[in-house]
Image (cartoon, helix red, strand yellow):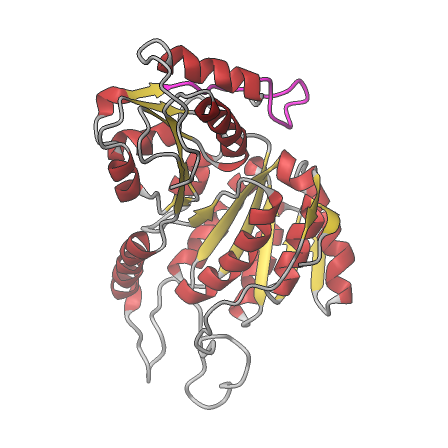
Amino acid sequence: MTLELLQGSVAITRAALAADCKFFAGYPMSPFTPLLEAMSREMADASGVCINAESEIEGANMALGASAAGFRAATGSCGQGIALMQETIAEAALNETPLVVFNMARNQQDYYQCTRGGGWGDYRTITLAPKDITEAVEHTQLLFHLADKHRAPVILYGDDLLAKTLVGVDVAPLDLPELPAKDWALDGSASGTGSSRQVWTFAMGKKNDPGPGPDGQWRRVAAKFAEIEQVEARHETVHAEDAETLVVAFGSAAKFAEYVVEELREEGHRVGLFRPITLWPFPGAALAEATRGVERVLVFELNAGQMIDDVRQWAHDRDTIRFIGGVSIDESGLAFGPLLDAPVIRERILAEHAEHAEPAAAVPTARS
């Protein structure tokens, strides 16, 4: 392993290049801008193309076109810019074109956007929420793989911390399974043969190949996403096996919550952590099992309560759920506010946990 001190945006860019990303287009908007800048510097040296588009809509559609031609392509912004990309993301889902979207969010208020979307039709977006830059490097490569595997749009849910923090990281290519050739790509090879290809949401085909049409295509896409929901959910648990209180958190906030949980365990408190790695598919069955027998489920997210809807759906006992997060944005409006602070998180966990539980003897700290 060779560690190199890199800004998060540079590390993510190099991970995209390691995944053979050949095209990137975006419009600058903080904290996404450092990623666009890194892409513009690094992609040219890797025989790729990076375009600073005139708007988020143009950037997303440029990336969609590059992907339709068979190249691994991506776009990105923060949540406000990605709001403008929703039609393109829906088109990618419904006409089955892989597309990687980097959301370098200003906070955690984009959970609904990533997991419910704002486009049209029956689709979802596979969304990975890394807790740190090391994991973001892995997730970036995995997302390009999943986008091609399922021919679907996918999202990396990052934030200001992941975009701008400097860490020592090893950007090593992941060993991922081989994928089928892109025999659907619009690469010009079938032109003039009578069997030329098309990528079209309505999938109506041509006279000699009528295609499934919109009803058949959309039914098939809906069935595909139902299958993805069953096979791609990912999660992590920390000390969940004997927890009286289980904290549920995602992304960078989960990194802080994990630190507090480890601290409380050393003091003898039976506290654990459940972290959804995929926000969609939400790892509901795993959460149901992890919360079986737990006395309190504490949801920590830096918004008014979005992930809590999924926790309520899947927790073994809804009456155990308490919300300990909240909207927390700094004065610039661009980054996390005071709730993303380990002592504050500790205080909120203990306010619920210690009220009902006496500290036990020191508990082993092996992860589940």
Q: Position of residue 67 (x, y in %)?
A: 54, 65
Q: Which residues are magenta?
A: 323-338
Measuring from the top left, give residue 333's x and y in whole percent: 63, 23
Q: Which quarter shows the C terminus?
A: top left
Q: For residue 332: magenta? A: yes
What secondary structure is the magenta-colored segment mainly? Answer: loop
> Is residue 54 visible in this depiction of the protein?
no
Quadrant occupied by the N terminus: bottom right
The residue most toward the top is 355
Q: Nearer the viewer, residue 348 or 278?
A: 348
Q: Residue at x 53, y 47 (%)?
A: 156
Pick the residue in front: 272 or 36.
272
Q: Position of residue 209 (x, y in %)?
A: 32, 81
Q: Is residue 349 above or below residue 274?
A: above
Query: At 30% across and 77% down in the image, what residue appears?
Result: 210
Query: Which residue is at the far bottom?
Result: 193
* 326 versus 19 height, above or below: above
Taking the spot 43% from the left edge, 76% from the top edge, the residue there is 180
Q: Is residue 264 magenta?
A: no
